[in-house]
Amino acid sequence: MNTSRGCSFDCNFCAIWEFYERKTRYMSAKAICDQLEKIPEKFVFLLDDNFLTNRTRLEQLCDEIERRGIKKYFATQGRSDFIADHPELMRRLRDCGLMMVLSGFESNSDDALAALRKVNTFDKNKRAAKIMRELGMISIGVFMARPEFKEEELDMLYDTINEMGVAIPLVTILSPLPGTQMHKKMKDQLLTTDTRLFDLLHAVTPTRLPREQFYKKYVEWHRKTLKSTWKGFFSALWRRPKFFLWDSIGGTYRFIKKEIYYAPIVDSYESHLRDEIGIIPADAIAVVSTTTKKRELPLFGAQTRPLTNAECAGS
C-alpha cells in the first residue's frame, strides 16, 4: 500500500520528483491505520517513494499503531540520512513493526553524492547501516557502479559494502534513465535508446574498461559482497531471533531459494554481453586523454584521488 506519493528531493538520476513537481502528498496516521486494519496479510510493503521523510507524521503513526494494537510487519523505502539522524525514531518504528528498509546509498564518495544531487554524505550512509544492524533490521542498500570505473575502483566499492555490513546489497550500473536530469545532460553520450537496456544492469554509456572486462568485474559484486550479507543478516538474527526463525521463516526460505536459483544468471558476464549483441558495439569504451589523463566522462564513486564537485559534474 502507499501512504504517500512523491519526493521532495531532486536527485539528478531519478525522475520521481519531476512527476510530482518535487512535492509530497501524505496520508494521515489515522487513514494509514484504517487501511492496515483492513489488510489480512501479516506482512505489508509500504510503496512510498520515500517513507522516511516527515518525522511528525511518523511519530503520529507510531502513536496510532500503538493505540490500536496493530500487529503487522512492514518493509519500505527510505533515505539513509533520515535513519542516521533519527535513531530513536527508527527504534520506535521497529517496535511498531518496521523490519526492512531499502535505501539508495549510491556511492562511497561525498563528491559523487554531491554530483548526484543526493544531499547526503558517506558518513551518514555508514551510520545508517550501523543503526539498522544494531536495531536488528534488514537493510537493502543500492549502490552504483560507474561505467567508467577501473577494476580497482569496483574493488574499492565492494570493500566498502563489506565494511558497512548491509544485509542485502544491490550493485547497479548507473544509467541516465529517460526523464531524468542526468539523461538530458548525457543524451549525446548514450550508446543506445533501446529501453530494454535501461534496466540498471547494462552500461548504456561508454565503459572505461573493454566491455567484456567491465562486465567480468561488475558481476563479481554478488560474490565479493557476501561478507556484507552475512554481517547484516547475522546481526539481525542475533537481535531478533523470533522474527527470523519463526515469524518470517517462510519468506526467508523463499528468498534464499531464489538467490540460489538465480545466482548463475547474476554471476554470468556473458548474459550482459549477449543482451547487447546488435545494439551496442563491443568496442564502445570511454576515451582517456593521453596528455591530461582525465576522463571524458565524469567520475562518481570510489576514487584514488578525491575529485572536486565540478569535476564530478563534468563541468
Image: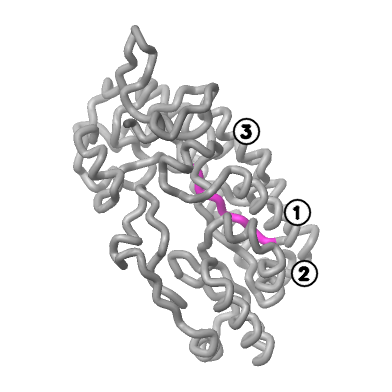
Q: Which mark is residue 159?
A: 3
Above-or-below relation of 119 to 207: below
The residue labelled by disc 1 is 235
Q: Secondary structure at mark 2?
A: helix
- State which region is magenta: 137-143
The residue labelled by disc 2 is 242
Report x, y in % for residue 75.
Answer: 56, 68
Which tag is nearer the camera, tag 3 or tag 2? 3
Which of the pair 219/71 is nearer the observer? 71
Tell me which residue sits at (68%, 57%) in the image: 132
The residues tagged by marks 2 and 1 sit, at their Cα atoms, a distance apart of 13 Å
Report x, y in % for residue 123.
Answer: 63, 44
**Residue 221 in magenta stretch:** no
Report x, y in % for residue 128.
Answer: 64, 53
Image quadrant holding the C terminus, namely: top left
Tell me which residue sits at (25%, 40%) in the image: 185
Tell me which residue sits at (32%, 56%) in the image: 15
Asked if residue 201 lies left or right of residue 91, the reply is left
Q: Secondary structure at mark 1?
A: helix
Q: Which mark is residue 37?
A: none
**Residue 139 in magenta stretch:** yes
Q: Picture quarter containing residue 61?
A: bottom right
Asked if residue 125 lies left or right of residue 294, the reply is right
The answer to whether residue 254 is seen in the rendering is no
Q: Residues within 10 Å of mark 3 (few under 14, many from 20)?
A: some
Asked if residue 90 lies left or right of residue 75, the reply is right
Earlier residue among tags 2 and 1: 1
The residues tagged by marks 3 and 2 sit, at their Cα atoms, a distance apart of 31 Å
